[in-house]
Image (spheres, grey):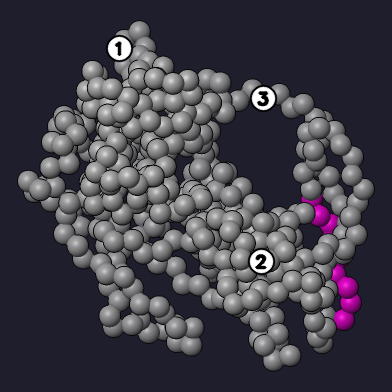
Amino acid sequence: MAFFKCFKKGTVTILEDESDSRDEGTTLLVGAPLLASEISEVDNYLHIPSWSQEVFCQLSSFKKSKSIDRDLHSTVLQLKSSHHTETDSLGAFELLSDRIHNEEVNWGSVLPSAGESTYTDYYWEWLEDVLNRNTQVLKSVGLYNAVFASLFSYDRHAPVIRAFYEYWCPATNTLHTSQGEMSISLWDLHEIGGLPITGRFYDEVIPNTESLNRKDHKGVSYIPHICRYLFLAYHKILRDSKGKSGVRMTAWIKYWYRGPFRYKNSSRKTVQNKSQKPKEDSDPSGIIAAALKRTEEEEGVFEDLGIADEDMDRSYLAAFLACWLCKFVFPKDDITLIRPGVFKVASRMAHGVSFSSAVPVLASIYKGLNDISSADDPGNCTTVLPFHYVLGSCRPGAGVTSCIVSFQEFSVDRANS
């Protein structure tokens, strides 16, 4: 069982025994939630009469061809400021491609990829086990497809990605292509990535001691009690890591998943031939087998944390969702670490609460693309974004698919020029 105490203002300390001292526990910084109360709906009060405005702008000029003999213009829909500031209509937008053409910046030999989903030992095995044990819960909160999406690797085509950055416009969050403006939408993230658009507000924060210990008039914990097991596991792993500043994702996975190892790191697929899969690859097939009875070794994690039988599946699911949020959905800063700020949301998801995750994911994508396309040294920009969602949105049926054709043509033209 985990106990929480506040020995210093602005912190919470995780203890294995209520009588333990602060030095025997793990101390974390707490944060104030963005919402003052746990409400699922916000007041329908619009403090500005109009949320958008139309601006007529010139798009970036592309290499002249027989099919393009004039400058392209477009009517752009822009969000207006809630602070009632007035801005003049912009002329032609300056894109990263313009700055590269003018030799103001260059890519160098590095392409930013921080946050893109990569192979992690035992993650796919754990994911398959979670999917076959928690199908109904995940489907009830609209997360089954979103979680399932992290079961595979995503190929990247460097010239296309560079072109994506170069023709991304931070002022409008759109791609300026020879076909006009295109972008990634919430619908793309929902239909292709499986992320819910509706639901509770996603707020990633470490709760204070009062919130963690608070109960309602029926004695039910304000925050699901299984959240305590996640904090306790975090404390145990960190205690055994001998001086590490955080819990590594690999350590978190190996602590919770104690089943067999089946999938090794996939080899890099070549750009020249995408039709044949390398023989040594062992990617998951996508077929989720029926759940098997847990072995004694697999049940060891529940004994170590003192988890009751009735809480096993939900605790196991919450632990995985915490990993999934850090690894696949909201990668931030050091992408190799588990962030305890996701524990509250992961616990509620495991209890059937749906969160509107597509909205912050799209905001994260926009910010990451904006940072790189505006950087003075784009090749060394350290911003983090879940680029696998961008790659997924560029597949057939997505809203930005047709722009990839333009990018591929552009990449070929640039290579030949």
Which residue is painted at 61% across and 66% down in the image? 380
Q: Is residue 301 left or right of residue 386?
A: left
Q: Amino acid at mark 1?
A: Gly
Q: Nearer the viewer, mark 3 or mark 2?
A: 2
- In terms of secondary structure, where does tag 3 sit? loop
Numbered badge on residue 378: 2
Q: Is residue 271 left or right of residue 352?
A: right
Numbered badge on residue 219: 1
Structural distance between the alpha carbons of marks 3 and 1: 33 Å
Numbered badge on residue 118: none
Which residue is painted at 30% across and 76% down in the image? 281
Mark 1 / mark 2, whichever is N-terminal: 1
Residue designated by label 3: 44
- In terms of secondary structure, where does tag 1 sit? loop
Structural distance between the alpha carbons of marks 1 and 2: 53 Å
Q: Which stretch did the figure color magenta?
A: 69-77
Pick the residue in front: 396 or 330: 330
Mark 3 / mark 1, whichever is N-terminal: 3
The residue most toward the top is: 217
